[in-house]
Amino acid sequence: MSHGPARPPASNSAAPWLPYARQSIDEADIAAVVEVLRSDWLTTGPAVPRFEEAVAAFTGARYGVAVSSGTGALHAAMHAAGIQPGDEVILPPITFVATANAVVFQGGTPVFADVDPETLLLDPAAAEARITPRTKAIVAVDYAGQPCDYDELRAIADRHGLVLIADACHSLGGTYRGRPVGTLADLTVFSFHPVKHITTGEGGMVMTDRPDYRDRMTAFRNHGIDTDHRQRAESGSWFYEMNELGYNYRITDFQCALGLSQLSKLPDWIRRRREIAGSYDLALGALSTLRPFKRRKDVDHAYHLYVTRLDFAALNTDRRKVFRSFLEQAIGVNVHYIPVHLQPYYRRRWGTDAGLCPVAEAAYQHLLTLPLFPTMKDQDVQRVLEACRGIGEL
Ligand SMILES: *Cc1c(COP(=O)(O)O)cnc(C)c1O
């Protein structure tokens, strides 16, 4: 993933570098971290359950299990779902590679199903068509921050006895038919990487309503051991048992303190993300060269990304030139995503060639992500829109 504030060498513009995404850290965040650094518990301490309970309260889920990354959270969710060698897991190719990798970590087989051309969200009918007797789970990816069609996916999962997992790394704070992301699947995964809605540096969390899933993931993040260091210290016991194979996916207390402090600002940040997206929508509506993707009427979009589609019929140029012209103006555009099944590893190891998901493959050629983060100023938005208007002349 190329993200973050790095300015590329291509840019010799005098304008300040505008990344496509970046974190917002204030003095309250810094004080929260420092307070934990002065305390007794740097890891497996009290800030971890406090952060888990706060995210659970925010999303309406019963439990949260915090881990060291969104990727670790996806892996923990696959473990909770019982994915084993030979099991198939259905997922869309328009996502970050980690979604598919987590299936492979468990020895499962990733099965790519195509997306809806209007939203680039997993097409429920395409997902259902990929089900075989070996299918165990479906992963829905809330691409760009727009929740998938969870009622439809739930009906399919129930019909075939599958676990429904949400990769909601883009959609913290979104809703579907009035219900919050975090309550829409059996297991919901968030990432707290610096480009996401809130950050812990690195970090992630899985939300679930099921105590058995929670217990399996709590052991999984700690080597598969059924108690952690603090629980044993408090009960004055040395005994522990490892019942399943796990990993060290623990998150630290100072990261969770940062996450808690960040969470208090999330509602304002989402409001600002929607406001910026609204400005983009309005201005791009007057252009023929760049178009926004369709928004479902029954969702509140969380706008992790503002993704557009380049209309080559209205342009004399290709995406490389457009991309370069933004960078030359010190504007950090990006492409989300190269379809995962076209990555060399997946082609080689899983034989997933071009033609497997034609809608995703065609859409990929047109994708361009514009900068979007809550501390962007109105004049930053205007600068991006000026550059958008300029691509007609390239
Ligand atoms: C960010 C992201 C991940 C991985 O999260 P990390 O915290 O970077 O490990 C997984 N899936 C999607 C869709 C993401 O955007």
Image (tube, rainbow, N blue to C red):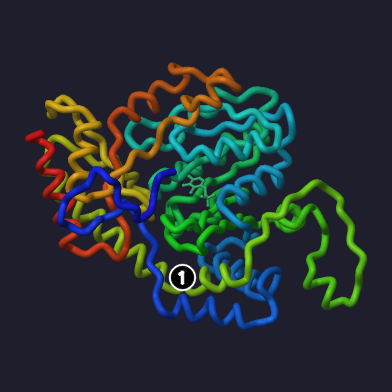
Total residue callouts: 1
Does residue 130 appear in this view? yes
Q: Residue at x 57, y 27 (%)?
A: 111
Residue 319 vertical placement versus 248 (above, below): above
Check disc 1 and give the amino acid type.
Answer: Gln
Along the horizontal axis of the image, is 384 left or right of 100?
Answer: left
Q: Secondary structure at mark 1?
A: helix
Q: Position of residue 327 (x, y in %)?
A: 23, 44
Q: Position of residue 171 (x, y in %)?
A: 44, 53
Q: Nearer the viewer, residue 38 or 23?
A: 38
Q: Quadrant of residue 222?
A: bottom right
Q: Position of residue 266 (x, y in %)?
A: 41, 67
Quadrant position of the N terminus in the picture: top left
Q: Position of residue 300 (x, y in %)?
A: 37, 54
Q: Quadrant of residue 132?
A: top right
Which residue in the protein does label 1 denote?
262
Quadrant position of the C terminus in the picture: top left
Does residue 300 appear in this view? no
Along the horizontal axis of the image, is 389 left or right of 248?
Answer: left
Q: Residue at x 55, y 73 (%)?
A: 257
